[in-house]
Amino acid sequence: MEKLKLIDKYIKKVTLWITGALFIVVGLSIFLQILFRYVLSIGLNWVDEFSRYGLVWIIFLGGASAINVIEQTCITFIKNKIPHKALKWIILVFRIAIIIFLIVLIITGFQFARLGKMSKTLALWGLSQYWAFLAIPVGSVFMTISYIIKTILDFFMFEETNHKQEAVQI
């Protein structure tokens, strides 16, 4: 279990750092576009396309590091009304459905990225759109690994967590 937690920790750390770096680069490129266009009257035609594809990468890589935060925002009113044993299985079914969706997204994303090899970007120095579309399967792989680890850890530690919460409430 500790190895799984360590793997999850590193995935979150790596994706967060890459997402942060991309966010800074996209922000700086947009700032340069504004500066060049309105101060120097020179438009940087690559910035629009770069920022669009950069934001796609940010969304998919950021998804892996945001899984725990997303899971913590739930409707506790409904969750508290469901018996603990039933809640365990409901959560498991939902997570398996999400994992299946992410696996389909990985497969479809690689097919979509492969199609991107046939076309070039207009403004990004003629790069293949493969690299832009690769954000979908790569981000989905990280999200899938994180979700599988979270599901395994939570499913086997569900009883311990509930007993601790009940002890605190008493």
Image (cartoon, grey):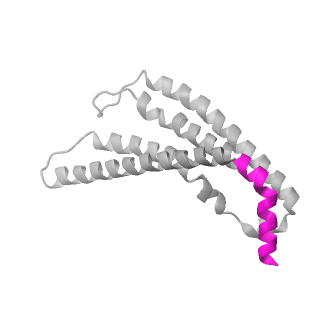
Q: Quarter of the image holding residue 31?
A: bottom left
With 54 as the anchor, is 147 left or right in this view?
right
Q: Residue at x 36, y 26 (%)?
A: 120
Q: Residue furthest left?
A: 40
Q: How many marks?
A: 0
Q: Residue at x 45, y 47 (%)?
A: 58
Relative depth, front residue between 8 and 141: 8
Relative depth, front residue between 27 and 12: 12
Query: Where residue 88 appears, x then y in whole percent?
Result: 82, 55
With 101 as the anchor, is 33 left or right in this view?
left
Q: Residue furthest top?
A: 118
Query: Where residue 22 appears, x then y in whole percent?
Result: 38, 47
Query: Where residue 146 appears, x then y in whole percent?
Result: 62, 45
Vertical position of residue 90 compared to residue 11: above or below = below
Q: Residue furthest bottom?
A: 170
Name the chief secondary structure element in magenta.
helix
With 47 as the anchor, is 160 left or right in this view?
right
Q: Residue at x 13, y 49 (%)?
A: 41
Inspect the magenta stretch and tell me whether residue 137 lies in it: no
Q: State which quarter of the image contains the C terminus.
A: bottom right
Q: Quarter of the image holding residue 164?
A: bottom right
Inspect the magenta stretch and tell me whether residue 160 lies in it: yes
Query: Where residue 108 appears, x then y in whole percent?
Result: 59, 30
**Residue range corresponding to the magenta coloring:** 151-170
